[in-house]
């Protein structure tokens, strides 16, 4: 899944700390760093300038290299995770004081590592004390230092192999599994045939064996923020699972594009069409929400989950909630219903309800009833269900 953690730290304690600080964005530097070096000082200044230039926003940032800005709309691979879609750079620096751990030469490049950590000792917040250790390369472009993603240097000697629409990229010591790749090829072909027959592209699939190895591909030497086992990005999938078959992430890459498709439906489709390939994993996820609906109806209910008033309850609630909607629609309208859902405006609660009602011809109250029934099938006090229905 893309996101196993949410902003648990964004509670009053951290908000107060951030609001009380009026410090400008300023880096603290380890004594290990050789600040007598002109280049090292330039790299530190480059990094500081970047964080003063609204890196939480996507635009033609002058402190990032031109090639990656041309290749990718969202060119800083750490941006989404480090800012979590809502925090700005000033807030980040205030809540998690940045500390330059090292600036080291890497051939003709330099590599900077920066720790983002809060000063809290409160047990309530200590688990998210270290936000991340960000690592970036700096390269010369027109005699000016600019920033670069780590993935360029990390993967330049990796092997590659194409299978269907997937181009696998993996470390030299990795043993490529052709059977798993063939399964992936068949799965992708089926999704394309059913839902996106005009698809004519390919994407890279970077294979790593751990979340920290995958984190390096997104510029993290360590990360609490955004930690997960797989992510679909522009033109690529990153995985920490150490295999070639990741249906959930394949779905993200292969669905028809729709900027108005909201998070719940996007993830719901990936869970229902992808994660569901592993019946045990799918049932376990659905059972979590089904149990919450049964045991905590005042907090966990149709409105609170679909509106995302409750985003996290030991798991990201959008995943099973969206899958429940997809399962409901498929049971009533099949693939045609899912295609309509994929193309609908589902950015918010009202959009989701309007779309589902239009597709199923049910009233909102009936949709709620059917959604609850769909989840109820997965409820088990023991947490185990012998056989997945449908």
Image (cartoon, rainbow, N blue to C red):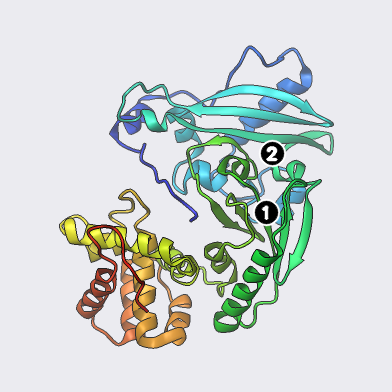
Residue 137's image quarter? top right
Number of numbered discs overlaid on the protein picture = 2
- Categorize mark 1 by other alpha carbons within 10 Å: few (<14), some (14-19), many (20+): many
Which residue bears the numbered disc 2? 63
**If you read the primary sequence from the N terminus, does the residue marked by circle 2 or circle 1 appear first?**
2
Residue 114's image quarter? top right
From the viewer's perspective, tell me whether residue 108 is left or right of residue 342.
Answer: right
For image coordinates 48% across by 81% down, the residue present is 339
Can residue 355 be seen in the rendering of this structure? no
In this rendering, the answer to whether 349 lies above or below 225 is: below
Pointer 2 and pointer 1: residues touching (CB < 8 Å)?
A: no
For image coordinates 71% across by 64% down, the residue present is 178
- Categorize mark 2 by other alpha carbons within 10 Å: few (<14), some (14-19), many (20+): many
The kind of secondary structure element at disc 1 is: strand
In this rendering, the answer to whether 112 lies above or below 323 is: above
Residue 249, position as x, y percentages in the image: 55, 62
From the viewer's perspective, tell me whether residue 200 is left or right of residue 187.
Answer: right
Residue 65, position as x, y percentages in the image: 74, 44
For image coordinates 84% across by 31% down, the residue present is 108
Which residue bears the numbered disc 1? 206
Residue 135, position as x, y percentages in the image: 64, 34
Residue lying at the far left of the rendered structure = 298
Is residue 367 or residue 213 the one in the foreground?
213
The kind of secondary structure element at disc 2 is: loop
Residue lying at the far front of the rendered structure = 386
Residue 213's image quarter? top right
Which quadrant is the C terminus positioned in? bottom left
From the viewer's perspective, tell me whether residue 144 is left or right of residue 24.
Answer: right
In this rendering, the answer to whether 236 lies above or below 221 is: below
């Amino acid at each position: 899944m893309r996101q196993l953690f949410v902003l648990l730290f964004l509670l009053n304690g951290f908000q107060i700390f951030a609001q009380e600080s009026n410090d400008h964005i300023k880096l603290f530097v380890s004594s290990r760093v050789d600040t007598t070096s002109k280049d090292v000082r330039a790299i530190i200044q480059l990094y500081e300038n970047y964080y003063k230039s609204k890196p939480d926003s996507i635009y033609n940032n002058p402190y990032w290299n031109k090639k990656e800005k041309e290749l990718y709309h969202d060119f800083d691979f750490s941006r989404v995770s480090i800012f979590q879609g809502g925090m700005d750079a000033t807030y980040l620096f205030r809540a998690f004081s940045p500390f330059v751990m090292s600036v080291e030469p890497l051939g003709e490049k330099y590599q900077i590592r920066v720790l983002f950590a809060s000063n809290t000792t409160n047990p309530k917040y200590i688990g998210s004390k270290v936000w991340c250790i960000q690592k970036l390369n700096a390269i010369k472009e027109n005699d000016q230092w600019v920033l670069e993603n780590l993935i360029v240097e990390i993967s330049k000697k990796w092997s590659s192999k194409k299978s269907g629409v997937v181009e696998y990229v993996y470390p030299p010591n990795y043993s490529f599994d052709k059977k798993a790749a063939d399964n992936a090829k068949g799965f992708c072909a089926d999704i394309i045939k059913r839902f996106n027959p005009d698809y004519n592209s390919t994407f890279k699939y970077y294979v790593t064996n751990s979340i920290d190895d995958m984190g390096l591909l997104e510029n993290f030497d360590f990360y609490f923020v955004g930690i997960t086992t797989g992510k679909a990005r522009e033109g690529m999938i990153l995985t920490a699972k150490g295999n070639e078959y990741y249906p959930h992430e394949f779905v993200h890459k292969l669905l028809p594009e729709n900027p108005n498709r909201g998070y719940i439906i996007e993830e719901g489709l990936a869970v229902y069409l992808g994660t569901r390939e592993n019946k045990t994993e799918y049932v376990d996820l659905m059972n979590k929400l089904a149990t919450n609906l049964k045991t905590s109806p005042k907090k966990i209910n149709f409105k609170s989950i679909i509106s995302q008033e409750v985003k996290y309850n030991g798991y990201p609630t959008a995943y099973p909630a969206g899958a429940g909607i997809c399962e409901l629609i498929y049971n009533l309208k099949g693939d045609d219903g899912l295609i309509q859902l994929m193309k609908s405006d589902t950015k918010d609660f009202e959009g989701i309800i309007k779309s589902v009602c239009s597709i199923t011809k049910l009233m909102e109250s009936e949709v709620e009833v059917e959604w609850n029934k769909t989840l109820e099938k997965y409820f088990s006090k023991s947490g185990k269900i012998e056989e997945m229905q449908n």
